Amino acid sequence: MTLLVKDANTTVQSLATGVDGNGNLVPVHAPATSNAQGVSTAVGPQNPLPVINAAGAVASDGSGTLATGGSAQTLFGGIVPTNGFLVQNNSSAVLWISDVGVASAGGASIQLAANGGIFATASGYKPAGPVSLFGATTGQAFAARRW
């Protein structure tokens, strides 16, 4: 059965409907996505709906080394990434990262394993504040990108 409804622009649109288990008329909504060949498949846990961040930005480098061991250091010159960020620990000791306050060894900070530990946000993620990094030793190397 098809139900005709008016949208916000008062244009008549058809809406597919069906009958639920209680005999009520309900809209039929079958979210789907299409692959590169244009074949449509149902959306579900094994085939999630793709999300495209239309506000993406070119990545900026924020790589470096810890200026002072035992003290938190702000990344990206204190600029809060608007669409996400990535940090990789390139040193032989652990680092801690925080985007909700000053980084420290523990607490709300996230530990980055030595020799390649990575923390990356989803595209479109904007942290609550500047990103900071903490490590015990001066000169610990890291790679960082913000977008």
Image (spheres, rainbow, N blue to C red):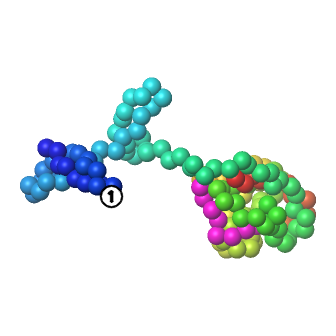
Say what secondary structure mark 1 lies in: loop
Judge whether residue 28 can be spotted in this image: no
Which residue does the image show at 90% across and 68% down from the upper left?
Answer: 68
For the N terminus, the image quarter is top left
Judge whether residue 14 can be spotted in this image: yes
The amino acid type found where label 1 is placed reads: Ala
Which residue does the image show at 17% across and 49% down from the upper left?
Answer: 3
118 to the left or right of 44: right
**Residue 77 or 120: which is nearer the viewer?**
77
Query: Magenta span has 127?
Result: yes
Query: Magenta span has 122?
Result: no
Residue 75 % position (x, y): 79, 62
Q: Which residue is mark 1?
A: 8
Quarter of the image holding residue 96?
bottom right
41 w.r.t. 110: above or below: above
Task: Pick out the residue farthest to the left.
Answer: 23
**In the image, which residues are magenta?**
124-132
Quarter of the image holding residue 31?
top left
Which residue does the image show at 43% across and 45% down from the upper left?
Answer: 49
144 to the left or right of 54: right
Residue 123 % position (x, y): 60, 52
142 to the left or right of 29: right
Q: Main secondary structure of the magenta part?
A: loop
Which residue does the image show at 17% across and 45% down from the upper left?
Answer: 2
Residue 85 % position (x, y): 69, 55
Give the class, few, some or many, for how many residues have Cα within 10 Å of label 1's Cα (few <14, many ≥20): few
